[in-house]
């Protein structure tokens, strides 16, 4: 059954009119007709099996046949990352992180950031597509860019991955199930002053293997380590 997304559908609905964007895809692009069955996700833990009762390219109307619900995971996996200069590399990270199980992503503005702004609408679509592809029922939270220092002040206590020498632990040793974001810096790494600021605010330095990783690879490594830690 084909999967579509609309955040406005809820368990209270018996009938539902899909957004214009998804209606166009359903009725004009895929040419689906009255009587065809589709599934709809709202990104909040619900899966709706539906039947098309009005195949209009601007307001496709559905009848809800069956509803499934999944409880939210008992953990938070929050990656705060400096976006890369090339959007396609960050899009790859967003897609794979969503498939693996990240629950929240924040973009960081650091002293060595390669990119000062991000295309939130485009990135949201990447997350939705990855959620549908991986059949996840929860859409990760995507936060706009914020200065590193401000993020640390509002999220004290977490983990920071950096390349400077010094004693470091592994992610599973210190990752908590909530309020424990993992900071991933830009290609040039965090500056010494940024690292010091994070450590003074309760962040623990962690290693990401023995090799130097690209930003997006470091982000995925952190997601995988986090998921393995929680699944254990």
Image (spheres, grey):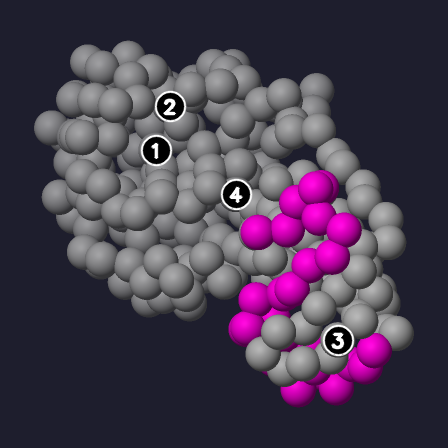
Residue annotated with mark 1 = 183
Q: Earlier in the sequence, mark 2 or mark 3?
A: 3
Label 4, label 3: how far apart the Cα atoms are: 31 Å
Circle 4/circle 1 CB separation < 8 Å:
no
The label on residue 164 is: none
Q: Which residue is mark 3?
A: 54
Question: Circle 3 — which element?
Answer: strand
The disc, 2 or 1, on the residue closer to the chain's N-terminal end is 2
User: Which label lies toward us, 3 or 1?
Assistant: 3
Helix, strand, or loop for circle 2? strand
x%, y% of residue 217?
Answer: 46, 49
Magenta part of the protein: which range? 8-34
Sequence-earlier tag: 4 or 3: 3
Asked whether the beta carbons under mark 2 and mark 1 sit within 8 Å of each other, the answer is yes
Q: Is residue 78 left or right of residue 5?
A: left
Tag shown at residue 140? 4
Pointer 3 local density, CA inside 10 Å: few below 14, some 14–19, many at least 20: some
């Amino acid at each position: 059954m084909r999967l579509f997304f609309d955040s406005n559908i809820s368990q209270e609905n018996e009938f539902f009119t899909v957004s214009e964007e998804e209606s166009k895809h359903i009725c004009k692009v895929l040419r689906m007709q009255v009587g065809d069955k589709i599934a709809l996700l709202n990104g909040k833990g619900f899966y709706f099996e539906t039947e098309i009762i009005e195949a209009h390219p601007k307001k496709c109307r559905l009848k809800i046949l069956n509803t499934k619900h999944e409880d939210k995971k008992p953990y938070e996996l929050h990656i705060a990352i400096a976006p890369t200069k090339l959007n396609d590399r960050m899009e790859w990270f967003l897609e794979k992180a969503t498939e693996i199980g990240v629950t929240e992503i924040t973009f960081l503005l650091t002293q060595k950031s390669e990119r000062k702004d991000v295309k939130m609408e485009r990135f949201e679509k990447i997350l939705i597509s990855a959620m549908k592809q991986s059949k996840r029922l929860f859409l990760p939270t995507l936060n706009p860019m914020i200065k590193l220092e401000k993020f640390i002040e509002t999220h004290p206590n977490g983990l920071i991955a950096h390349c400077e020498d010094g004693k470091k632990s592994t992610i599973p040793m210190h990752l908590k199930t909530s309020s424990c974001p993992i900071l991933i810096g830009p290609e040039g790494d965090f500056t010494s002053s940024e690292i010091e600021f994070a450590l003074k605010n309760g962040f623990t330095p962690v290693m990401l293997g023995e090799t130097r990783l690209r930003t997006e690879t470091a982000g995925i490594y952190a997601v995988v380590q986090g998921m393995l830690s929680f699944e254990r």
